[in-house]
């Protein structure tokens, strides 16, 4: 159903030939395969088939270092929902609402009811995402958790949606192996590297100027939506604006604000398991404009983009150091078989960029983002980074720990094997930890 609903929308993009280069067509095709991807960083997690490159002969996984974004959540503030509802509701009272407008009104009411005044609240879908991620991790790397009473260290941001994501993940991990024992922790001292991105003041002006110049290249249609929702757009907007201004002091309603509010409702509806293509009420040019607006908003600041993201990416070194320190301890003592962290999207992007994770943290120019950086794929809900450590199952010398040079690692981003930019693997996607450690320490 999702694919069928959006095929027509892809066709509507084609008149804008300036943005139909092959790479951009690929972006439109991927959006057409699942309309919920238009929601960008509000897009729910996609569980892809697991494909593992065989580890070098004799190597087995023994430790996992992980950072996961919280699962699907509600948005912040119900203003967008209320703006759509109030506008359409009043238009309906005037008798100028189209059938499509009536449908959108009902769906928006459902979204508002699901939101229930809870900003940034983890939804049922978000809990399911983390529970399933835990099960997939366990089954994929079972040897890591097979020891006697395996110990797992768990950190979480203090924010509710991260704490409940942590609970959903560890609860299902325990279902796989009830012998697993946990050391849970959270607190103010850890917030800077669990949820922070540093000071952006030095690039604020440059970021806005770059973003504005890129968006200026995109078409933006502010009339199509009116004809879809109202039989008499001028009466509907004029009367609604007058009424809301007089009764509540609300900001003046514009076409742009209404369209953006509809996009916001459409983006978050999937996080409540409301399966309906609200994007279809907008025109294709506007939808694409908002996708790129969100892409630039995130990637220019947090995703290794030249000239704008340097302060935030550099700030992530503290979190990268936490990966290094805890991995060294796991190799030396074997106390913990896994370190699990539960935090936020922007922090995760900065960490992946600082580490040089291929496809996510590539160094790139702002003008290349449209063709090369799909926001829905790189930072969806429950996005995660997993560094898997391997060692020989039978060391050459009996009763000794393997040397650092013998420890290998591979990196998964959203459970997909990734290369590390700037390093040569030993085999496939497997790297010497000593090489990775040196690169990440020098970043």
Image: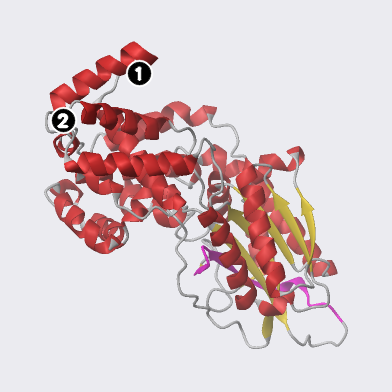
Residue drawn at x 69%, y 40% is 191
Residue drawn at x 47%, y 67% is 47
User: For residue 79, what is the image quadrant?
Assistant: top left
Q: In this view of the protein, which residue sits in the foreground, 259 or 316? A: 259
Rendering coords of residue 335 (x, y %): 83, 67
Mark 1 or mark 2: which comes first in sequence?
2
Q: Where is 439 relative to 415, above or below?
A: above
- Asked if residue 306 shows in the view, the reply is no
Q: Nearer the viewer, mark 1 or mark 2?
A: 2
Rendering coords of residue 343 (x, y %): 62, 48
Q: Dot 2 surroundings within 10 Å: few (below 14), some, or many (20 or more)?
A: some
- Asked if residue 32 shows in the view, the reply is yes
> Which residue carries the number 1 mark?
251
Q: Dot 1 surroundings within 10 Å: few (below 14), some, or many (20 or more)?
A: few
Residue drawn at x 57%, y 65% is 133
- In the drawing, does residue 443 fall left or right of residue 151? left
In three-dimensional space, the C-alpha distance between marks 1 and 2, rounded to whole angstroms, equals 22 Å
**Range of residues picked out in magenta:** 400-417
Q: In this view of the protein, which residue sits in the foreground, 107 or 270? A: 107
Rendering coords of residue 223 (x, y %): 15, 33
User: For residue 177, what is the image quadrant?
Assistant: bottom right
Q: In this view of the protein, which residue sits in the foreground, 37 or 282? A: 282
> Which residue carries the number 2 mark?
96
User: What SS does tag 2 mark?
Assistant: loop
Rendering coords of residue 375 (x, y %): 40, 51
Q: How is the image coloured?
A: secondary structure
User: What SS does tag 1 mark?
Assistant: loop
- In the drawing, does residue 291 fall left or right of residue 220? right
Q: Where is 180 relative to 103, above or below?
A: below
Q: Where is 267 relative to 81, above or below?
A: below
Is 410 inside the magenta-drawn segment?
A: yes
Is 279 inside the magenta-drawn segment?
A: no
């Amino acid at each position: 159903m999702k694919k069928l609903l959006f095929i027509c929308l892809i066709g509507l993009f084609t008149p804008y030939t300036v943005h139909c280069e092959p790479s951009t067509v690929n972006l439109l095709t991927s959006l057409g395969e699942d309309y919920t991807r238009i929601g960008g960083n509000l897009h729910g997690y996609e569980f892809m088939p697991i494909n593992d490159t065989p580890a070098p002969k004799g190597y087995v996984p023994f430790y996992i270092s992980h950072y996961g974004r919280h699962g699907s959540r509600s948005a912040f503030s119900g203003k967008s929902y209320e703006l759509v509802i109030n506008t359409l509701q009043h238009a309906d009272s005037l008798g100028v609402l189209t059938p499509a407008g009536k449908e959108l009104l009902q769906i928006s009411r459902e979204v508002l009811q699901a939101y229930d005044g809870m900003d940034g609240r983890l939804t049922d879908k978000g809990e399911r995402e983390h529970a399933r991620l835990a099960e997939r991790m366990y089954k994929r790397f079972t040897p890591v958790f097979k020891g006697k009473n395996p110990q797992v260290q768990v950190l979480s941001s203090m924010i509710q949606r991260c704490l409940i994501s942590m609970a959903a993940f560890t609860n299902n991990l325990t279902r796989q192996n009830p012998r697993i024992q946990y050391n849970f922790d959270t607190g103010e001292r850890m917030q800077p590297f669990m949820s922070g991105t540093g000071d952006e003041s030095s690039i604020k002006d440059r970021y806005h100027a770059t973003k504005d110049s890129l968006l200026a290249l995109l078409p933006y249609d502010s009339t199509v939506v009116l004809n879809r929702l109202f039989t008499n757009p001028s009466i509907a907007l004029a009367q609604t604006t007058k009424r809301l201004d007089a009764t509540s002091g609300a900001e003046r309603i514009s076409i742009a604000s209404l369209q953006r509010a509809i996009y916001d409702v459409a983006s978050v509806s999937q996080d409540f398991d409301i399966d309906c293509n609200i994007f279809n009420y907008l025109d294709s040019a506007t939808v694409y404009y908002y996708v790129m607006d969100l892409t630039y908003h995130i990637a220019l600041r947090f995703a290794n983009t030249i000239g704008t993201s340097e302060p935030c990416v550099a700030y992530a070194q503290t979190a990268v150091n936490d990966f290094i320190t805890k991995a060294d301890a796991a190799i030396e003592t074997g106390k913990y078989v896994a370190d699990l962290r539960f935090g936020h999207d922007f922090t995760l992007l900065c960490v992946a960029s600082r580490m040089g994770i291929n496809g996510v943290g590539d160094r790139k120019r702002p003008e290349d983002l449209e063709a090369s950086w799909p926001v829905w794929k790189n930072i969806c809900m429950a996005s995660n980074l997993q560094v898997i450590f391997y060692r020989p199952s039978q060391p050459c010398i009996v009763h000794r720990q393997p040397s650092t040079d013998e420890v290998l690692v591979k990196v998964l981003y959203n459970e997909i094997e990734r290369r590390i930019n700037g390093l040569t693997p030993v085999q496939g996607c497997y790297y010497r930890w000593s090489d990775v450690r040196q690169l990440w320490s020098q970043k």
